[in-house]
């Protein structure tokens, strides 16, 4: 019984800490940090701006501000910004 419970806990922790998105992709704009963040740091706005999945995390206000500042690196910076503003309307000027 204890072994089964321990296996379930490990499986859940692995799912929580799983990296999101593809691996590092320097060839695609906005993709240098792809695969760096765990799913707990999401949601992610990268795909909204044409960047790889798992980039531009906006799970906290601080990350939202960072995503706006770094949006110029994405193929479609306005896509990143509009995604951030949906999550954090207070950042809209």
Image (cartoon, rainbow, N blue to C red):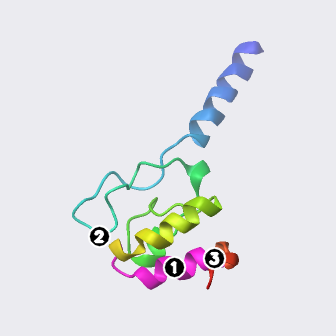
- Quarter of the figure with the C terminus: bottom right
Task: Tell which circle, 3 or 2, labels the residue nearer the N-terminal end.
Answer: 2
Quote the CA–CA distance across marks 3 and 2.
24 Å
The answer to whether the residue labelled 3 contacts the one labelled 2, judged by CB atoms less than 8 Å apart, is no
Secondary structure of the residue carrying tag 3 is: helix
Q: Residue at position x 38%, y 65% from top?
A: 52
Task: Tell which circle, 1 or 2, labels the residue nearer the N-terminal end.
Answer: 2
- Residue that label 2 marks: 29
Q: Which residues are magenta?
A: 74-86
Mark 3 vs mark 1, foreground winner is: 3
Magenta stretch: includes residue 78: yes
Q: Residue at position x 58%, y 52% from top?
A: 41
As displayed, is residue 65 above or below residue 91? above
Q: Position of residue 54 (x, y in %)?
A: 46, 59
Say which mark, if any, is on residue 93. none
Left or right: residue 4 compared with residue 47 = right
As displayed, is residue 18 above or below residue 1? below
Task: Tell which circle, 3 or 1, labels the residue nearer the N-terminal end.
Answer: 1
- Taking the view exactly as shown, the residue that stands out farthest to the top is 2
Q: Give residue 91's quadrant in the image.
A: bottom right
- Residue that label 1 marks: 81
Using a 10 Å C-alpha cutoff, classify the residue at mark 1 as few (fewer than 14 neighbours), some (14 to 19) or many (20 or more): many
Left or right: residue 29 compared with residue 79 = left
- Taking the view exactly as shown, the residue that stands out farthest to the front is 93
As displayed, is residue 41 above or below residue 48? above
Mark 1 vs mark 2, foreground winner is: 1
Quote the CA–CA distance across marks 1 and 2.
15 Å
């Amino acid at each position: 019984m204890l072994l089964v419970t321990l296996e379930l806990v490990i499986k859940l922790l692995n799912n929580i800490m799983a990296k999101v998105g593809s691996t590092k992709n320097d060839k695609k704009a906005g993709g240098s940090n792809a695969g760096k963040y765990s799913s707990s740091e999401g949601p992610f706005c990268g795909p909204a701006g044409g960047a790889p999945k798992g980039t531009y995390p906006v799970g906290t206000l601080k990350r939202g501000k960072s995503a706006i500042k770094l949006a110029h690196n994405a193929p479609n910076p306005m896509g990143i910004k509009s995604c951030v503003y949906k999550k954090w309307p207070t950042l809209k000027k």
